[in-house]
Image (spheres, rainbow, N blue to C red):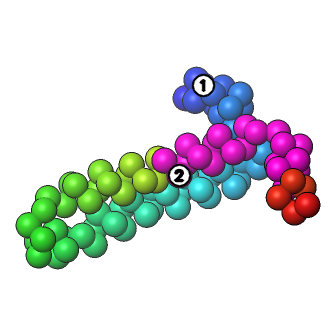
Amino acid sequence: MKKLKTWVDENLHGDPVIWAVVFALSLISILVVYSSIGTLAYKRTVSPEWYLFKHTFNVLLGLSAMWIAHKILPVLFEVVAVRIVD
């Protein structure tokens, strides 16, 4: 548990409540998708785990993009925005 706290302190800057809400909603979405795909998987003769893995991959991809975006300096976003507007 101490290693996790150290990793979080070093890598997740910003509001810890927002990060906790994002991770909680991500886990809830994975559970909701898995619980609701039984009929869809039955109709399409596909394994429910396929939908679970697909959704989990998309969630992890989104969390990775969010983590990368939070590591970028805000000044760089400002430079890009000014160039787009001008």
**Residue 28 appears at what percent x and percent y?**
44, 62
Q: Is residue 4 above or below residue 66?
A: above
Residue 36 in the magenta stretch? The answer is no
The amino acid on which the numbered mark 1 sits, given as a three-letter code, is Lys
Please tell me in which quadrant of the rendered image residue 49 appears. Answer: bottom left
The amino acid on which the numbered mark 2 sits, given as a three-letter code, is Gly
Estimate how packed mark 2 is, as few (under 14), some (14 to 19) or many (20 or more) residues with alpha carbons within 10 Å: few
- Which residue is depicted at the point 43% across and 53% down? 58
Q: Secondary structure at mark 2?
A: helix
- Report the span colored magenta: 61-81
- Which residue is depicted at the point 87% across and 53% down? 83
Residue ID for mark 2: 62
Nearer the observer, 81 or 21: 81
Residue 77 in the magenta stretch? The answer is yes
**Residue 52 appears at what percent x and percent y?**
29, 56
30 left or right, relative to 25: left
- Residue 76 in sight: yes
Q: Which mark is residue 2?
A: 1
Q: Is residue 42 above or below residue 30?
A: below
Please tell me in which quadrant of the rendered image residue 69 appears. Answer: top right
Mark 2 vs mark 1, CA separation in Å: 26 Å
Q: Main secondary structure of the magenta part?
A: helix
Task: Give the number of callouts.
Answer: 2
4 left or right, relative to 18: left
- Which residue is depicted at the point 47% across and 47% down? 60
- Residue 13 in sight: no
8 left or right, relative to 54: right
86 left or right, relative to 49: right
Could you tell which of marks 2 and 1 lies nearer the N-terminus?
A: 1
**Residue 21 appears at what percent x and percent y?**
62, 58
Nearer the observer, 2 or 22: 22
